[in-house]
Structures are given as C-alpha cells and as structure tokens.
Image: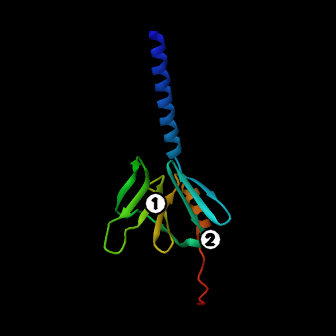
Amino acid sequence: MVQQGHRVWNVIIVFTVFICLMAFLAHSKNWTKIEQDQVKILSGFYYKKVKFSQMDSVVWVDKIPPMVRLNGFSAFEKEKGIFREFKDSLTDKKVNVYVDNLLNQKIKLVYDDSLKLYINYKDSVNTVKLFNLLQGKVEKPTGKE
C-alpha cells in the first residue's frame, strides 16, 4: 500500500518535469511559417498571423521602446509577450514582442495602420532573411489614388 503512494508521487513528479520541459522548448525559439499570403509566428503560448496585404512597414530597430508588459516574460536575452506602449490619450494598442536575442537588431513590423510587432531570432542570419522576405512583401504605393 505504501509503495502505491510512492508510485503516484513519482508519476506526478515525472509529469510535472515533462510539462516544464515542453513549456521551455515551446518558448526557446520563434517558429515562423511563411505562406503565400501571410506569415504565422508561434512562440510558446503566443501566436500571431499577419497577412502581407496588411503590412505597412518593415524596419530595423536596435532597441525595443520602453513599454508596459501585459503578459509575457523576460529571461536571459529573450523578451516575449504582449506589451502596451506607454498610454497616451490617442492609443491603447497592444504590441506583440517575439525577441530571441535582445542584443541583436530587431524587426519592427507595423500592420493594420498602427499595430506593431517586434521579432528577431537568436541567429542574426535568419533574422536578416526574414527581414528581406517581409520587406519584399510590403506593398509599395503606386502613387495613384
């Protein structure tokens, strides 16, 4: 009877460690999928779809501006979650942040006129590839109204 109780606790401990490892792996990097008309970003619990037709601009930034974290985390060189720019009377927009390396440049993607997303990968070469792809997908104005 006593050994049965130990087995239950052993199963609970192994299950808890497994769940923690899965959560760590899910947040360990940004997973992106480029489709014909959109980019999908998955990082742990955070998921975002941005259609290429909704993108307004793609630029490099060295630092993320100061923001209030609504949820998410910072650990080592990572910063992930949903943030809000310091409130003013004009905006109450949420900002998605998927940064794997705070020391490297980040991509600032503005979409739907004023929504922002910051992303980079641990490997700067992959970040440059994503930047070039997104930059090529931003619709250029034709000058005709």
- How many marks overall? 2
Disc 1 designates what residue?
Answer: 96
Q: How is the image coloured?
A: rainbow
Image coordinates for residue 10, horizontal then vertical, percent: 48, 21
Image coordinates for residue 20, horizontal then vertical, percent: 47, 36
Identify the image quadrant of residue 136: bottom right
The extreme top residue here reads 1
> Is 25 or 145 nearer to us in this picture?
145
In the displayed structure, would residue 30 be above or below residue 134?
above
Three-letter code, disc 1 = Asn
Query: Helix, strand or loop at disc 2?
Result: helix
Residue shown at the point (60%, 90%) measured from the top left: 144
Residue shown at the point (54%, 56%) measured from the top left: 124
Image coordinates for residue 46, horizontal then vertical, percent: 50, 53
> Is 35 or 57 nearer to us in this picture?
35
Residue shown at the point (39%, 53%) measured from the top left: 71
The extreme right residue here reads 36
Disc 2 designates what residue?
Answer: 137
Q: Which circle's residue, 1 or 2, is located before the other in the chain? A: 1
In the displayed structure, would residue 111 be above or below residue 3?
below
Identify the image quadrant of residue 36: bottom right
Task: Give the quadrant of the C terminus.
Answer: bottom right
Cα–Cα gap, marks 1 and 2: 20 Å
Image coordinates for residue 67, horizontal then vertical, percent: 35, 61
Query: Helix, strand or loop at disc 1?
Result: strand
Mark sitting on residue 107? none
Contact between marks 1 and 2 (CB within 8 A): the answer is no
> Is 28 or 19 nearer to us in this picture?
19
Three-letter code, disc 2 = Lys
Q: Nearer the viewer, mark 1 or mark 2?
A: 1
**Callout 2 crowding tier (Cα within 10 Å): few <14, some 14–19, many ≥20:** some
Residue shown at the point (43%, 50%) measured from the top left: 77
